Image (spheres, rainbow, N blue to C red):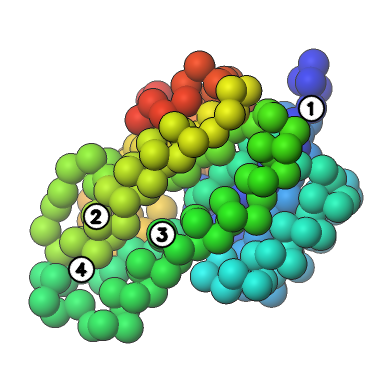
């Protein structure tokens, strides 16, 4: 058990990196409130982890759903010590001009607006308490580019700017950090790399470094573009 248990709020908790982080935080003795768009996945998380952890079906694109979720979570657990905006999607590989308008909007809505919605409804309670760390997941494609993933690149470049601007707005005692998780073999990477994704660590392997790294972040890291160490 850690010397100090933290309360972690995590989006996209049921798949990939989110699922691995959820298990990692809980195994380390911390309390997690997570969300997923899939009710079935939420039921599975509830069955596996139970109280005091909390899992809810939430579409982060829906500001009212996020507001209701945040209100219930804060009422039960208080403000988070660590808020992790992990939920994201990627477009199917295609030149920008071939990406359908609806698919482009989905990537923007989840990867940027979803992050803003979560911040809007959780961060005021953290500001009032004057403590807490906000980690917004960026990407290597938030600091560089590749063909056929232009919409995803656009959102992750946006997360870098949004987070660094937010870092300038927070009071002392808090931090906002754009975090590149690295290259991990998830369904998202498989959609881009195909079998080439097998050359990279899976989410569970990655989380063994990522969870302790996330828990080690402090106000001294405010505004720094960081990357999970290998």
The reply to whether residue 124 is visible in this rendering is yes
Q: In the rendered image, which residue does mark 1 sit on?
A: 5
- Secondary-structure class at tag 4: loop
**For this rendering, which residue is in front, 170 or 214?**
170
Identify the mark nearer the N-term, 2 or 4.
4
- Picture disc at residue 93: 4
Q: Is residue 173 above or below residue 77?
A: above
Q: Is residue 89 above or below residue 139?
A: below
Give the crowd class for mark 4: few <14, some 14-19, many >=20 residues within 10 Å. some
Query: What is the distance, in whole Å, between disc 2 and disc 1 at their CAs?
Result: 35 Å
Query: What is the distance, in whole Å, between disc 2 and disc 4 at their CAs?
Result: 12 Å
Q: In the rendered image, which residue does mark 2 sit on?
A: 153
* Residue shown at 84% from the left, 45% from the top: 77
- The image quarter containing residue 191 is bottom left
- Secondary-structure class at tag 3: helix
Q: In the rendered image, which residue does mark 3 sit on?
A: 112
Give the x, y percent position of residue 1.
Answer: 80, 22
């Amino acid at each position: 058990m850690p010397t100090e248990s933290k309360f972690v709020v995590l989006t996209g908790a049921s798949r990939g990196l989110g699922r691995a982080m959820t298990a990692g935080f809980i195994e380390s003795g911390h309390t997690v409130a997570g969300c997923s768009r899939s009710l079935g996945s939420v039921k599975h998380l509830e069955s596996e982890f139970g109280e005091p952890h909390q899992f809810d079906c939430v579409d982060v694109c829906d500001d009212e759903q996020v507001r209701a979720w945040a209100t219930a979570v804060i009422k039960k657990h208080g403000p988070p010590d660590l808020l992790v905006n992990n939920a994201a999607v990627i477009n199917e590989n295609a030149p920008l001009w071939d990406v359908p308008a609806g698919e482009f909007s989905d990537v923007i809505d989840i990867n940027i607006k979803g992050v803003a919605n979560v911040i809007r409804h959780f961060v005021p309670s953290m500001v009032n308490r004057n403590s807490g760390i906000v980690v917004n997941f960026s990407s290597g494609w938030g600091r560089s580019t590749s063909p056929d993933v232009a919409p995803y690149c656009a959102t992750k470049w946006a997360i870098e700017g949004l987070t660094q601007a937010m870092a300038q707005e927070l009071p002392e005692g808090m931090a906002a950090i754009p975090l590149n998780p690295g290259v991990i073999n998830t369904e998202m990477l498989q959609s881009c790399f195909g079998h080439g994704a097998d050359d990279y660590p899976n989410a569970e392997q990655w989380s063994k470094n990522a969870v302790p790294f996330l828990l080690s972040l402090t106000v001294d890291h405010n505004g720094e573009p960081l990357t999970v160490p290998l």
